[in-house]
């Protein structure tokens, strides 16, 4: 641990030129070096970056990977996601607790090891999984959890848990030694090879407008979830007035059950940077940012190595690919644990070193984005598609898929299936075909697009994966016979309560209220009237919330009540006017303990 | 002015000027749109959502959404009244609102809005959160029990007073107003003449020693529903 | 035909709402014409004699006995009215909700500034109902049909509510009758 906090903070601030927009990097560094960002540290950071202390505290208290209270030098974050849960995560958690002698949220008495839950870390196809500091540990079993605990207690470092990765110098080999890419089906867009620079050179052979026209002609829609036409977005950004413009790659990948961006960044980062570079050319940007979720820190060295190689190849930096006047470079901004930072305006706020809270829209990022300049935010996969469009031509790209949904889509498949992993499929695949492909024919439910998406039962398995039918950012979770969909909905509501940014009333409060009632029903204390109560409440949260999070967070309950009504009704009891949610014994437990006598029942 | 434009709110034609939000244009026409986090002179927050209207069939916050030519806005409809009511009810159960001994009672915008919307009691269970009171400042205190996270104090201190005394800390349901000093409000540069001291719509930021000055029956909203002033001005 | 019956109770309240009920002044005579009082502190009847049209309950639930009385009301009354802020949202007694029960007792009986209790014992007679961890609004424990907020609710509001319910319609409070303080 560095000895002098003040010197450490000044050094970090100096590295970033005292730029207040790099606040997140500075506090991340403090967290990593000192295990927390203390009250004193917050004062020092505020001074060093000329920001208010309350802004520093606002940031430190906002992100899950930052803390004001000391944490262990080693933090174990067990992924809390339905996919991990149905593969035994709870038993793994219990084994950690037992082996370390602490509960979740606690730190060992020597202050060395902290145990926490964290929302989905994108290792759903090889779960249960955990991050030990930045090191991912997959396929956990209670035995493996005990072994990990034993090594850590004995003073070994997180990297000692993955000796093969630790002893590997090559960055991409190191990633491979840590996690599996599990690509089950390769398509022609994302995973097909392309020599670095090929698409960029083709783009540079024409005008920026021509690039935009080509992407528009391909009818490429954004792969991050919302499905906005990529060419149109670039055109807006190009036409918006601004002395600087930015290209941002959204690699926040926080939707539970999604991990395809992790695999793209592992296997084909060149294609992503290729796409970013031609996007920069198209809109007139000199700077690009990859916003990488904190959970993927272990990909960073690999990505930096690829960026460095592209610089030496002349594909980044001054005069890209020899084109005088086209300068473009990319930096990586690592997040700090907040799902909402995948929402593009929250991402921009976060990249500016602030609390990742969405902005009011309009104006949209294409006109007022990063540092208030026109900015195009696109998903990792979208950039790959765009590069492929420019390389092979729009018509080649749009000849697969459907009229409205052209090209291929990466699916991240997890849950009750025989073959979890990554599949690059053509748009238009039916859910039934999908289930055959992944070995999930006996599914009772498929969660398409993660918890914020759609959850359907067998009656709808003839529907298709496409923007015009079942849209998905890539998350495909399959639930097999015997799974309780009310329990699944309760898990997802935990997630949304945890991840609401807290800015607006309906999402901040409404999700808490939805969860309360779902948990009540799950505990067998619900009454039939709770169904109508939930339906109204969900509608209100969806209609009144400010951003996409609150506008979709009730979906697990909405689709649950619509498509799995009998499962919900099975939990309900009769309504006799006495609220079954009130548990007299629980409410009296404290008094019984204090008074040392039992309640007298009439 | 030449570049004014027309649009409709609940079928009534109103005039807007470029740069105006729907809420501002409505106000100029004597149409009241409920609001809590919006305050004239501060940048809009879009946080409370009680100003929600339907614009071309989509829900938008009137305080933040720009007025524009030809827009069709729904404001005072059964559907929207009901949705607003629920959001106000959420604010009541989220905090600890003991109106019976609150200095702000009768002058409180949250309470007045509940009265005007006819809320006898929230339909949701009370959450009874544990919140803090900071009385470390000699002249002002902040009571987290009553804070509705509207952010007015934050924007007023930052943009009007130029001080940045307040800021949000934590997130999700734990979001609260933090202050710019380790030692609490008393350690900040807040002074009694700051705009931030007077903008709180509820009884969360109050001046010390001046509570309960106006007798019951003569307070702002005892007999006049919130918004009626504005409606009268326009009429 | 028998007159419809009304029952009333004060749980964790201060009887202020009952005082406000009496504040309907001369209309109390009309009320007596319209209804019979069943279980109520007003006539000192301790148990229900039969089914009641309206139950007015003041105060929230602070202890086990409050819960049992309230459940008894729910079982015997067609329409249950939460009378006043304490019944509606817990009221002043609910200020203890953020404080652990043991601390509340120690503060009330031992450590409080105005407490004189040389023995330092906290009362624990078997006759004393056990306290709940939190003071509950009535709707946390039973289904409530009508809420009359106010500390206390204005007499006119109570009159409107009672007469409306006897007439079988929903109460319609004016702006001046719907108040939270
Ligand atoms: C709560 C929320 C989370 C989001 N998370 C992501 C994400 O992790 N990755 C992503 O690419 N887009 C995410 N989005 C969508 C982005 O806001 C944005 O639409 C997208 O990055 C645009 O890229 P595209 O047009 O290439 O899809 C999210 C949106 C919301 C509302
Ligand atoms: S909907 Fe939720 S995440 Fe979005 S702004 Fe509101 S509180 Fe924040
Ligand atoms: S702030 Fe307003 S709503 Fe809250 S207790 Fe005070 S008067 Fe009541
Ligand atoms: S203290 Fe008052 S002004 Fe500030 S956020 Fe809370 S309610 Fe709004
Ligand atoms: S007044 Fe518009 S969101 Fe609060």
Image: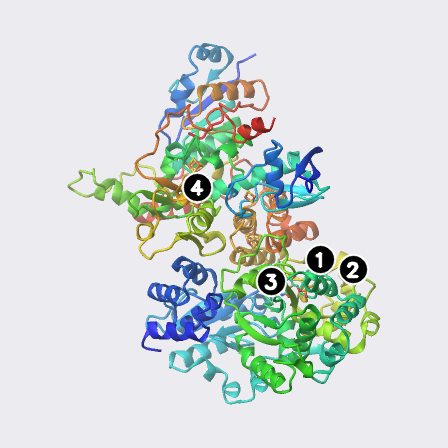
- Give the Cα separation between the discs numbered 3 and 2: 41 Å
Query: Same chain for marks 3 and 4?
Result: no
Q: CA distance from mark 4 to mark 2?
A: 51 Å
Whether pointer 3 and pointer 2 mark residues with C-beta atoms closer than 8 Å, the reply is no
- Viewer-nearest residue: B166 or C142: B166
Cβ atoms at labels 2 and 1 below 8 Å apart: yes
Q: Which mark is residue A373?
A: 3
Residue A456, numbered label = 1
Mark 1 beta carbon near ligand 1 (under 8 Å): no
Mark 3 nearby-residue class (10 Å; few <14, some 14–19, many ≥20) = some
Residue in the picture at 77% in, 73% down = A389
Q: Nearer the viewer, mark 1 or mark 3?
A: 3
**Residue identifier under label 2:** A463
Question: What is the x, y in percent for residue B81?
Answer: 61, 35
Q: Are marks 1 and 3 in contact (CB under 8 Å)?
A: no
Q: Is residue A501 shown left or right of residue A458?
A: left
Query: What's the chain of the residue with tag 3?
Result: A
Answer with the quadrant where ligand 5 appears in the image.
top right
Residue occupied by mark 4 = B200
- Taking the image as shown, residue A165 lies to the left or right of residue A156, namely right
């Amino acid at each position: 641990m560095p000895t002098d906090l003040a010197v450490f903070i000044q050094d970090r601030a100096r590295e970033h030129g005292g730029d207040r927009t790099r606040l997140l990097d500075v506090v991340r560094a403090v967290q990593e070096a000192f295990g927390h960002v203390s009250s004193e540290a917050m004062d020092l950071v505020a001074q060093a970056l000329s920001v208010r202390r309350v802004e520093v505290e606002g940031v430190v208290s906002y992100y899950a990977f930052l803390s004001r209270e000391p944490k262990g030098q080693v933090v174990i974050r067990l992924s809390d996601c339905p996919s991990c849960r149905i593969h035994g995560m709870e038993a793994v958690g219990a084994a950690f607790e037992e082996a370390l002698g602490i509960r979740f949220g606690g730190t060992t008495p020597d202050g060395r090891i902290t145990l926490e839950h964290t929302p989905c870390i994108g290792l759903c196809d090889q779960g249960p999984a955990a991050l030990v500091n930045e090191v991912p540990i997959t396929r956990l079993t209670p035995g493996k959890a005990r072994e990990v605990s034993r090594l850590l207690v004995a003073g070994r470092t997180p990297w000692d848990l993955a000796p093969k990765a630790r002893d590997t110098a090559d960055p991409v080999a190191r990633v491979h030694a840590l996690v599996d890419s599990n690509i089950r089906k390769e398509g022609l867009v994302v995973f097909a090879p392309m020599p670095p620079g090929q698409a960029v050179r083709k783009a540079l052979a024409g005008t920026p407008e021509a690039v935009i026209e080509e992407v528009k002609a391909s009818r490429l829609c954004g792969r991050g979830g919302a499905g906005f036409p990529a060419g149109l977005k670039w055109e807006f950004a190009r036409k918006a007035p601004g002395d600087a413009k930015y290209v941002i790659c959204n690699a926040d990948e926080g939707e539970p059950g999604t991990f395809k961006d992790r695999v793209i960044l592992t296997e084909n980062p060149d294609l992503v940077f290729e796409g970013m570079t031609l996007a920069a050319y198209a809109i007139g940007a000199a700077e690009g940012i990859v916003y990488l979720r904190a959970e993927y820190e272990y990909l960073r060295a690999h990505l930096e190595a690829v960026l460095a190689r592209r610089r030496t190849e002349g594909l980044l930096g001054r005069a890209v690919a020899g084109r005088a006047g086209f300068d473009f470079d990319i930096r990586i901004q690592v997040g700090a644990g907040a799902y909402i930072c995948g929402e593009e305006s929250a991402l921009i706020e976060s990249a500016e070193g602030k609390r990742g809270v969405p902005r009011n829209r309009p104006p949209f990022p294409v006109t007022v984005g990063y540092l208030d300049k026109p900015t195009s935010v696109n998903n990792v996969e979208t950039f790959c598609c765009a590069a492929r469009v420019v390389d092979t031509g729009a018509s080649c790209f749009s000849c697969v898929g459907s009229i409205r949904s052209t090209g291929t889509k990466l699916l991240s498949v997890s849950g009750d299936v025989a073959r979890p992993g990554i599949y690059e499929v053509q748009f238009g695949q039916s859910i039934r075909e999908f289930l055959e492909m992944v070995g999930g024919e006996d599914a009772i439910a498929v969660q398409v697009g993660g918890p914020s998406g759609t959850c359907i039962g067998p009656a709808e398995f003839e529907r298709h994966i496409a923007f015009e039918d079942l849209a998905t950012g890539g998350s495909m979770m399959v639930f097999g016979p015997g799974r309780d969909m009310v329990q699944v909905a309760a898990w997802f509501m935990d997630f949304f309560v945890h991840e609401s940014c807290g800015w607006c009333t309906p999402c901040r409060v409404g999700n808490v209220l939805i969860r309360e009632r779902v948990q009540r029903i799950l505990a067998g204390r619900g009454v039939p009237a709770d169904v109508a109560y939930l339906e109204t409440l969900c509608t209100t949260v969806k209609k009144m919330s400010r951003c996409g999070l609150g506008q979709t967070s009730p979906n697990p309950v909405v689709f649950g009540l619509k498509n799995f009504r009998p499962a919900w009704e099975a939990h309900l009891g009769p309504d006799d006017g006495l609220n079954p949610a009130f548990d007299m014994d629980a409410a009296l437990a404290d008094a019984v303990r204090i008074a040392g006598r039992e309640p007298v029942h009439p | 002015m030449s570049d004014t434009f027309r649009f409709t709110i609940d079928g009534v034609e109103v005039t807007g000027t470029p740069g105006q939000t729907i809420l501002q244009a409505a106000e100029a026409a004597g149409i009241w749109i409920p609001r809590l986090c919006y305050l004239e002179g501060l940048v809009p927050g879009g946080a409370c959502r009680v100003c929600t209207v339907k614009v071309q069939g989509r829900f938008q916050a009137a305080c933040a959404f720009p007025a524009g030519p030809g827009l069709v806005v729904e404001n005072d409809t059964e559907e929207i009244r009901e949705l607003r009511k629920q959001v106000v009810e959420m604010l009541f159960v989220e905090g600890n609102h003991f109106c019976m001994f609150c200095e702000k009672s009768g002058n409180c915008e949250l309470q007045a809005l509940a009265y005007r919307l006819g809320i006898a009691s929230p339909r949701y269970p009370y959450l009874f959160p544990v919140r803090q009171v900071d009385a470390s400042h000699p002249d002002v205190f902040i009571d987290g029990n009553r804070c509705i996270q509207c952010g007015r104090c934050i924007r007023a201190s930052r943009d009007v007073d130029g001080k940045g005394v307040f800021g949000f800390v934590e997130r999700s349901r734990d979001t609260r107003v933090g202050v710019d000093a380790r030692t609490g409000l008393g350690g900040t540069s807040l002074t009694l003449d700051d705009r931030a001291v007077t903008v709180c719509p509820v009884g969360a930021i109050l001046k010390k020693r001046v509570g309960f000055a106006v007798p019951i029956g003569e307070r702002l909203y005892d007999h006049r529903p919130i918004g009626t002033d504005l409606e009268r001005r326009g009429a | 035909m028998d007159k419809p019956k009304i029952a009333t109770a004060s749980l964790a309240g201060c009887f202020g709402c009952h005082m406000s009920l009496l504040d309907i002044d001369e209309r109390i005579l009309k009320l007596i014409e319209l209804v019979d009082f069943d279980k109520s502190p007003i006539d000192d009847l301790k148990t229900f004699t039969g089914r009641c049209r309206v139950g007015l309950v003041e105060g929230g639930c602070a202890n086990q006995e409050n819960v049992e009385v309230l459940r008894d009301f729910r079982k015997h009354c067609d329409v249950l009215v939460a009378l006043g802020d304490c019944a509606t949202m817990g009221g002043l007694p609910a200020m203890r909700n953020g404080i652990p029960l043991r601390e509340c007792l120690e503060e009330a009986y031992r450590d409080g500034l105005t407490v004189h209790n040389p023995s330092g014992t906290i009362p624990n007679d078997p006759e004393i109902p056990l306290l709940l961890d939190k003071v509950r609004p009535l709707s946390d424990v039973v289904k409530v049909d009508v809420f009359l907020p106010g500390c206390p609710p204005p007499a006119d509001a109570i009159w409107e509510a009672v007469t409306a319910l006897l007439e079988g319609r929903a109460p319609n409070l004016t702006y001046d009758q719907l108040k939270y303080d």
